[in-house]
Image (cartoon, rainbow, N blue to C red):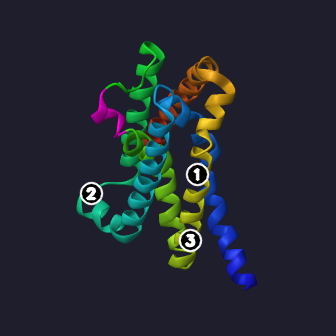
Amino acid sequence: MADIIRELALTFVPLFVSLDPVGNLPIFLAFTQEGTARHRKKTANLAILTGLGVGLLFVAVGKAIFSLLAIEVTDFLVAGGIILLVLAIRYLITGKSLDIGDVSVSETIGVVPLGTPLMVGPAVLAALLLLMGQHHVAIVLFSFILNLAIQWALFRQANRIVAFLGRTGVSAISKVIMLLLAAIAVKMIREGILTVLG
């Protein structure tokens, strides 16, 4: 039993740091600030399901797909960084990352960018790949699902946070968060390029 708890801790912590559930919450608020409470709830569910699907698919066939397409994790890192950078810049310039008025776009926010690459992106996929080589797959999957459950619980508190801060407060915080997101995106691109060059 002690060994299982130790393995859970050793797999949970790296995934928690990689997924960063607390850090994702203000970004979730920024992307959904124009939506209704129902829209935020739906987006949260979609983001978690997307993250779970991407993670499980990567665990099952990630190595094979990467090998088949000759894709490296660094390629995924650069691509994810570019997507986040474009969205952050658009928000800082126009005040909107995506046009929430467009139903087709608003319904995909949970998939891209929230589900992936923000939540389950290169860092989480790389962590999953590394941990599967060191620990039992069932333990790694349990830790991954537990992290997603924590993220879902935090996302579900978004409506209360919006009610507390008000739309003006959320909008002001969102500007700062998007600036940080742009910096994170640049960091992802830089890390990917330096890894390739190195």
Which residue in the structure is indicated by mark 3? Answer: 142
Residue 99's image quarter? top left
Single out the mark in the foreground, 2 or 3: 3
Which residue in the structure is indicated by mark 1? Answer: 151
Which residue lies most toward the left here? 68
- Report the Cα–Cα distance between label 2 and label 3: 29 Å
Would you say residue 198 is visible in this rendering? no
Secondary element at image label 3 = helix
Write the residue at 38% across / 63% down: 58
Residue 86 is situated, as x and y percent measured from the top left of the image, at 39, 27
Q: Amino acid at mark 1?
A: Gln
Q: Is residue 106 a member of the stretch shown in magenta?
A: yes
Q: Amino acid at mark 3?
A: Phe
Write the residue at 30% across / 32% down: 103
Residue 8 is situated, as x and y percent measured from the top left of the image, at 66, 72
Region rendered in magenta: 102-108
Which residue in the structure is indicated by mark 2? Answer: 70
Write the residue at 50% across / 48% down: 119
Q: Which mark is residue 185?
A: none
Q: CB atoms at circles 2 and 1 under 8 Å apart?
A: no
Residue 4's place in the image compared with 169, above or below, is below
Residue 188 is situated, as x and y percent measured from the top left of the image, at 48, 39
Which residue lies most toward the bottom here? 1
Circle nearer the N terminus (2, 1): 2
Secondary element at image label 1 = helix
Residue 189 is situated, as x and y percent measured from the top left of the image, at 44, 36
Q: Amino acid at mark 2?
A: Ala
Secondary element at image label 2 = loop
- Report the Cα–Cα distance between label 3 and label 1: 14 Å
Single out the mark in the foreground, 2 or 1: 1
Q: Is residue 96 left or right of residue 71?
A: right
